[in-house]
Image: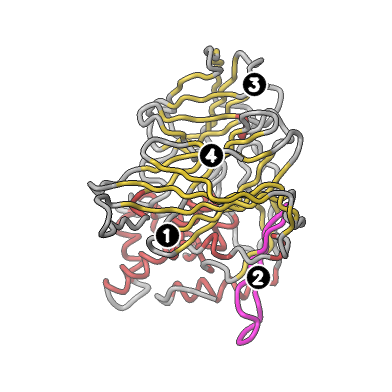
Amino acid sequence: MGIFRSIGLYVLVIGLLASCASNQTMSKYNFAKLYKGSELIIKPNFSVYHSTPTTSEIHFQLNSTGLLYNKPENLNDYTANLKFMFLMYESFTSNLIVDSASFMVSDINNDKVAKSITGKFNVNADYPKRYILRVIVKDMNRGIEEEKLIELDKTSRQNRQNYLMENITTRQTHVKYQVNNSGPIRIQHNDKMIQRLIVKYYDREFPLSPPPFVSYNAKRFDFEPDSFYYVILDTNNSFITNFKKEGLYHIQSDSNATEGLTIRRVDQYFPKIRKHKDMLPSIRFISTNKEYRAISEAEDPQDAADEFWLDRTSSPDKSRELIRNYYKRIEDSNEFFTSHLPGWKSERGLIYSVFGPPDNIYRTISGESWIYGNGKSQPNLTFNFTKTFNPFSDNDFRLKRSPEYKSFWYNAVDTWRQGRVYSY
């Protein structure tokens, strides 16, 4: 395992463990904290780049606004101190740790300006294997920690983890598979034998997921692009591009394959909801067909949407609080569940927006199980999601639907419609 220093950061390895076993497999661990949006402050993001046949780089990014900067009496600088710890497993069902370490990252910010903090570390990973990486990040000054699960897929030399993205303006690695503006991005491929890539553009609108008790067949994705072009790689095996139009950009080394790197060009505020026109579609989750049609066809849809929320409560203040909670869940869904479509439109986003964060989450290589309730005062409510192969994203999960959810769904929707935030 190797640690790399990024500009402005001091990184120190303080431990390494490998080829040992933990007490339990990750499939038995409750990962509910992953989606506790209101409780998350550090919010680290990660991406994977397979730099060599035996090594992969884990790039991280987080914002300084989520960190606590202190100035001890014996020091002159305001400093944030982070402890990173990672454990890498062969699978969710294995308790064998194949690589692990912990290290410290310190950042000085005397001007207390908002900035992006980036860095990277190496893990030992061989072709053609898969791994599960659990990364825990602790703000030592505040005493809180958050974690992320990362799936390393080294079974293919064409998937997204064989590409590295860099923001040309900031010179920092771009760790998200989405961009909010048309600024230049450098994209590098790890195969020196590849001399050109194809970039396919898709302009798609995706429908809302129906309620969880409705059985339906999702429309098959049309892989015929709206446009495409080829790029020649430079001596660094990279090229620079701009993503000017909103939509999907699918970059491939083999146009006959389906895998590649997909960049989603999104609205400047995404994953936040800042425009009234973006607030309207998700009202559909808790409105009737007649109500939603009336809002959509109104002379002023913004006023009609405001009236919808005012009708739910007895005062503007209560309406504002209800709106704040509802759209916070929509934004969290965008943060957690975005794939080829915005997260709030996904099936996990549907459940999360209406029911809220689950009390228990269990992960396997094939999917997630969400459990609401403590099993004592009321029976547990469980939603099972199956992970699907998606050439555009590794974050696509489909709900196992059941007519048994009907009463639970309408109870949750009725609670929202009565002006109260629903929690199971």
Question: In the rendered view, does 190 fall on the left or right side of 64?
Answer: right
Tell me the amino acid under the disc marked 1: Met
Report which residue position mark 2 lands on: 405
Residue density around tag 2, few if under 14, some if 14–19, many if 20 or more, within 10 Å: some
- Against 388, residue 184 (above or below) is above
Report which residue position mark 4 lands on: 3
Mark 3 and mark 1 lie on one chain; the one further toward the N terminus is 1
Residue density around tag 4, few if under 14, some if 14–19, many if 20 or more, within 10 Å: some
Give the Cα separation between the discs numbered 3 and 1.
Answer: 39 Å
Give the Cα separation between the discs numbered 3 and 4.
Answer: 23 Å
As drawn, the label of residue 140 is 1
Mark 4 and mark 2 lie on one chain; the one further toward the N terminus is 4
Q: Residue at x 62, y 84 (%)?
A: 378
Residue 288 x %, y %: 49, 65
- The single residue placed furthest to the front in the displayed view is 74
Mark 1 and mark 4 lie on one chain; the one further toward the N terminus is 4
Tell me the amino acid under the disc marked 4: Ile
Q: Classify residue 373 by image quadrant.
A: bottom right
Give the Cα separation between the discs numbered 2 and 1.
Answer: 42 Å
Q: In which quarter of the image is the N terminus?
A: top right
Give the Cα separation between the discs numbered 4 and 2.
Answer: 48 Å
Give the Cα separation between the discs numbered 1 and 4.
Answer: 19 Å
User: Badges 3 and 4: C-beta atoms under 8 Å apart?
Assistant: no
Report which residue position mark 3 lands on: 191
